[in-house]
Amino acid sequence: MTGGVTGGPALAAKSWPRWLLFCLQLSLGIPALVHASCPRPESSADMVLAGEALLKNDFPEGSTATFQCSVGYVRDSGQPDITCNEGKWTEVTLKCKKKSCGSPGEVQNGRFDFTNGIEFGAVIKAFCNEGYEIVGQDYRQCLDKGWTGRIPTCEVVQCEEPPEIPNGKIVSKPHSEFPQYRDIIQYECNAGYTLFGKMNIMCNATGEYEPQAPACSKGIICETPKVPNGHRIAGAPPPYKLDYFVTFACNNGYEMDGRPEMTCTVEGWSHGPTCNPVTPLFPTAGPTKDPDEDRDAKKHETHWEIIVTVVAVLIAVAVGLCCCWVYFSRKKKGTAAYNRTAPAP
Ligand SMILES: *[C@@H]1O[C@H](CO)[C@@H](O)[C@H](O)[C@H]1NC(C)=O
């Protein structure tokens, strides 16, 4: 039929009957198309149009369209075809479901968390058992072609070389290279030394030793502690052994910063207090001081001065008056006595 449209003038005379036929078909066909064609079928998240239907724009009466499951989905049940019937599509019976990626594999010394499932789109995260660390990407995603990446591995946590201790040595260590999680290192002190702390230490899940390495000592671990401008108020007297503690107080005129106790540890005294000079009560320009306080204090001082002065003056006046009174009364009596005792000539 396309030959008639593209044939050109040279073929025109020969093609006349076909032209006529075509026009006839068109005049009959157009009304049918207008009245009974179906709209383009709509795709959904789990299914899309497939095959010829994808390229077509017109879906006349009686034509069919085929669906297929979207990427990541598979057919669960039903048929993929629909038919245009009196301008309406028959119902889609195809049911699609998400593909399952199946088992993502086993994580050695760890596990996958499957709370998101194992179907298309799901992301599963890998976790290691205690004392193990993940190597590689710690998740996989279920895509159309299966799980992304590869199974991560969990490697055992390692500790650094165990610490050497003065006057002692390591007597047992399970792995020649670096100790691993749960490995136990055993220490011993040289002859004549006593072990303080724990003989065994373990490489723990975070790659540290627990507890800290022991110390070997002849017994006295800590020197007599000194706090400048302070003095000992409680705790054992020297010699100071492990875990002994002392409590300090500051001398007069000093105030404490920090905790008053110090404990003797294998690393020496724990952080002790410091004694700092007490800040003067009335600093030259103390910004935190209330100026009213000063004024009130002065006022009280002045009051006292006045009262003392007044009392002193009153006492002085009273004493003066007393003296005068005694003097004059003596004088009077004296004259009277003389007059009385003197024999009359
Ligand atoms: C391992 O030991 C260190 C130091 O003793 C400690 O801080 C840490 O909490 C320990 N880790 C675990 C998981 O117990």
Image: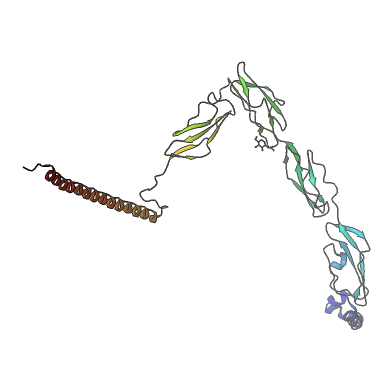
Asked if residue 180 lies left or right of residue 303, the reply is right
In which image quadrant can residue 161 be found?
top right
Is 285 placed above or below 252 here? Answer: below
Residue 194 screen position, x and y as percent: 62, 20
Image quadrant of residue 35? bottom right
Q: Quadrant of ligand 1?
A: top right
Residue 199: x and y in percent read 67, 25
Nearest the eye: 142 or 37 = 142
Q: Is residue 321 above or below residue 162?
A: below
Q: Which residue is found at the position 43% from the left and 37% from the top? A: 252
Query: Residue, x 59% and y 27% (percent of image)?
Result: 242
**Is 336 displayed left or right of 259 in the figure?**
left
Q: Nearer the viewer, residue 343 or 289?
A: 343
Where residue 140 appears, x then y in whole percent?
77, 48
Q: Decide which of 310, 62 is in the foreground and name it.
A: 310
Query: Relative to the observer, which residue lies in front, 304 or 256?
Result: 304
Q: Position of residue 234 (x, y in %)?
A: 53, 31
Task: Name the colour scheme.
Answer: rainbow
Q: How many marks?
A: 0
Locate the N terminus and report the quarter of the image it occupies: bottom right
